[in-house]
Amino acid sequence: MQLRGAGITVFCGSSPGADPRFLAQARALGAALACDGAVVVYGGASVGLMGAVADAALAAGGRVTGVIPRPLVERELAHRGLTQLHVVETMHERKALMSRQAHGYVVLPGGFGTWEEMLEVVTWKQMGLHKKPVVLVNVGGYYASLLAQVQTAVTDGFMRPHFLTYITVVESAEAAVAALRAFAEPGEDIGKWA
């Protein structure tokens, strides 16, 4: 995938997390995407891993587009230094706009919102609604339990084994950017249930 000019949507926490590696990898991701000329698309907040990704991308001369619901703007969580900030009314509008601008997705550590965003775009991929890369950055093994649950779903017959290929799991921001660069659109198997 050519990253220059591509919108890369980043899902991540609005908290920094307890492990300093989380913030370090968020900053590394923002800087690396900017250096490759990608447009970082994210949830528009100034705090946590979200703010770290945006700040690092901007500091590296990159373009950053934020999409944030109005209630979070009213709580003064919006990042005011972005290239572009879209204020929407609902979380559904936020996710739809972020996905329309995405040529690919990168997922960093986060909580319910991050998980929900990732699982939704993987479900869309499973249904054949897109063929974009979804790269999960498993910093310090943060997503080990979730990945084990995904494997359990396959073992117990709720998911087909090839669905495991819909998420590329890496350990670092550098590896995430390399995975995006190496991505080639899959064939017709996307969206096939059997």
Image (cartoon, rainbow, N blue to C red):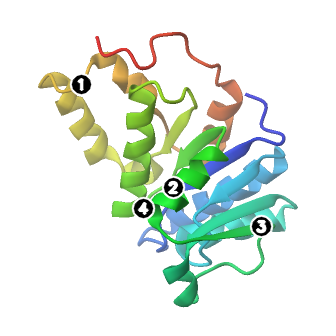
Task: Give neighbour class at mark 1: few <14, some 14-19, many 20+ (Cα, 10 Å).
Answer: some
Secondary structure of the residue carrying tag 2 is helix
Type of residue at label 1?
Met
Q: Are marks 1 and 3 in contact (CB under 8 Å)?
A: no
Q: Point out the image quarter for the N terminus.
A: top right
Of residues 46 and 75, the one drawn nearer to the viewer in this rendering = 75
Q: Are marks 3 and 4 in contact (CB under 8 Å)?
A: no
Quarter where residue 109 is shown:
bottom left
Extreme bottom residue here? 75
Residue appearing at x 58%, y 89% in the figure: 76
Residue appearing at x 28%, y 45% in the figure: 146
Front: mark 1 or 4: 1
User: Taking 54 as reference, is 171 left or right?
Assistant: left
User: Cα distance, mark 4 to mark 2?
Assistant: 16 Å
Q: Which residue has dot 4 on it?
A: 110
Front: mark 3 or 4: 3
Mark closer to the chain start, 4 or 2: 2
Front: mark 4 or 2: 2
